Image (cartoon, coloured by chain):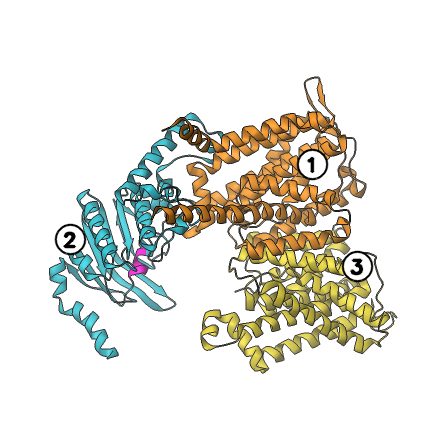
Chain colours: A orange, B cyan, C yellow
Amino acid sequence: MTRQQKLFYFLSLHRTGLLVLCVSIGLLLFPLVENNPYTLGLTNLVAINALVVLGLNLFIGYAGQISLGHAAFFGLGAYGSAIATTTFHCSPWLAMILVAVCVALLALLIGIPLLRLSGHYLAMATLGLNYVVHNILLQWDEVTGGPSGFAGIPALTLGNFSLDTPIRRHYLLWCFVIITMLFCLNLVRSSAGRSLAALAGDELAAASLGVNIQVSKVKIFVLSAILASLAGSLFAHTFGYISPDTFNIFASVQFSIMVVIGGMGSIWGSLFGAGFLTLLPQWMDVFDTYKDFIHGGILVLVLMFLPQGLISGLTDKLRIYLALRRRNAAT
Amino acid sequence: MLQLEGLGKNFGGLPALDKVSFTLPQGRVTALIGPNGAGKSTLINCLTGILTPDQGSINFQGQNIVAWPAHAIAKLGIQRTFQNLRLFPRLSVLDNVLTGLICASRQSIFMAMLRLPSLRHEERNLKLRALEALDLFGLTDKAQWPAAILAYGDKKRVELARAIVSKPALLLLDEPVAGLNAQETRAVSEELQNLRRMGHTILVVEHDMDLVMTVADQVVVLDSGSLIAAGTPEQVQHNPLVLEAYLGRMEATA
Amino acid sequence: MYADLLQYIFSGLTTGSIYALIALGFCVVSNTMGIVNFVQVDFVTLGGMFLFSALFVLNLPVVPALVLAIILVSLVAMIIERFGLRPATTQNHMILVFLTVGLSTIVRGAIKMIWGTNRMAVPPLTPDVPVQILGASVLPQALWIFALTLVAIAGLTWFFYGTSLGLSMRAVAANPVAAAVVGIPTGRIRLTSYAIAGALGGLAGILVTPITTLSYDVGVLLGLKGFAAAILGGFGSFPGAIIGGLGLGLLETLSAGYISSAYKDVVAFIVLLVVLCTRPKGLLGK
């Protein structure tokens, strides 16, 4: 092999790792280029949304089921952390972990019976769960502050170093995102990940190959709930104030749209979907009036023409096109 | 190796399988033949845990595996191919074959996310085994292709590679040459004989009599859910019940 | 004490009838098309909106306004089916559910644009002079709800058992493959299903918005509760939808009256989750 060929081979073999490295460097340098607090606040929100979407996408893309209620886990994480750190003066990091464990247990409890049902029922059940959680957040105002929200949530600290400026939060949040992405990318390229891909592709074949369908679905559901809860805790500590309406069923639908844009089961797509939909209102001044049209329109158009999602649908087509070209060139 | 006793399955009152009993000897190829609708696919589905029989027992290596779920049966070492192909079109050819090794891997999701060194070691081994299986069927240079773009004949071989990569104790092949032309059929026939030489125990459901006569050590005949004959290919070929099951049908339609 | 209970029962049956109508709408589409139709929630809103416009923009008297509103909702439903749902060629249920979610969002956006985001008042069918029945105070609107729900149920029964199109639809529900083989036109069946679902949802909206007031998202909560009612009664079963609707209405009102009225809206979804987790078939489900 020539040196150039060796280089290309190396790049292609390690392309995922290199891409992660490039993105990490980009994120590392970003605040040097752009330190407007408003912009950073926005990208911080993208990071938080990306965490939720990564988990949700694993569930939708690999378990092949729909959840229209992940904002419930997001909200439970946020309020759980808020209440634990403010009312009970618990340490924020400990609270985050405890709340995530509680949310995981809830997801397990609900997931085991619900994941035996077909898609529609799970979709509506998660919607119902979301509604119940949202309603409790609204009504139980002694604990949650009710419709006026919950303020005064302390920032996260690393020892004496307080993570209370947008730049510091940028590094914290994107650290979480990169680590989560690495975990997800590792998962996808492993035997366990192949089990999940098989599950998403053809349940019967997957079962015949040794995949325990029910257990796998529940595991992924719980994992996605944990990620949403962690994201919720980070949200609470980043913005210092939370209110119930951020966690209603429409928020869940928004997360689902991010998944659909990114593509079911696509890790990088999750990042893209979260970024695109979070930043979209910034690029369209009249966004608010047309918000429903745009969200609904994206969902309908993408699903009609690229049922696997936008980015992964396009990359699938590209891969097939390139492979066909190579095949036809070889014959 | 595998023993069926009195296997029965009803669909809403209609018996698809009726007191079927036979034995699959180890290291031999058994062919399961019969006219359309005889219950062959139902039998395979009962063996692999996709359907639960209503009566009877299936004894595999000393255990009764009736009503076991499909994934548990796969972990025991029973692998199958599907009549209508069930590949994963979005995955590459190599990844498709790697799914055949899921039953041989003990990774958990947690371990996979951390990508521990033991896992990386296992991944390398799994990839080597998958590539070996692909090599057996001459598909090595197509390993990275998305499975969707393969020709039909190649897709069938990928499914076959997927089924044998874990060196299963029992291989169930559901019409492995259906839809293939004469040349491809000959290739698969040779590959099956190769597998037999390697010591695999195989149950083949087939309509192609040439293949059956060449490859099978034992033939079992099903008609309308009942076992009507069992024996060597020559014995079954001349069995009047078998002839009637096939030719008798032709007379009725003539 | 006794008068309270009777009051709650009447109130529960009233809301229950609305849930029953919406549940029937879900039922029809699910039986003939095999999907959960999220747009059903917007049919409810549209019913109220069209009634509002018919009364105050076109200045029609009550009865023609009501009829026109129902017809318009059915038309919109058919348009949505024909241009929003039919072009999707996928059979994948997950994608179809997402699709209806998307369509529902678009319809809600359109409603927001046309009628604005303010709450509106819709007058009841007859003036709101309470009637005394057995010691309980009942609004005439509630009586209209009972009456028209009965009419709707009678109409549905006549349609499905007395007309050939209805028979075709029952055939499709029972065995879609056989129905296609026999030559039953699926396009017409789908349009009719959506039209009926639209009419039922629209009627529910027309009847209930004088009580709940009207806004662009009034149908969402009602619609979801209607779905919970359908699950309670047994998803896909017509008698189940009716019993589930009435049952849920009673459960809701009685728990609000005797336990707590703050969490009234949560009752429906707790019922939904409990049923799905323990007995997904519901009371009368197949």
Secondary structure beneath dot 2 equals loop
Residue at the spot x=52%, y=36% of the render?
Answer: A184
Tell us which disc is closer to us: 2 or 1: 1
Specify whether disc 2 shares its chain with disc 3: no
Checking the image for residue A278, the label placed there is none
All told, the count of numbered labels is: 3
Identify the disc placed on residue A45.
Answer: 1
Observer able to see residue C149: yes
Q: CA distance from mark 2 to mark 1?
A: 67 Å
> Is disc 1 on the same chain as disc 2?
no
| Cα distance between the residues tagged 1 and 3 | 30 Å
Please tell me whether the stretch drawn in magenta is mainly helix, strand or loop. helix
Between circles 1 and 3, the one closer to the viewer is: 1
Residue assigned mark 3: C215
Q: In x, y percent, where is residue C205?
A: 75, 66
Location of mark 2 (residue): B217
Which region is colored magenta? Answer: B40-44
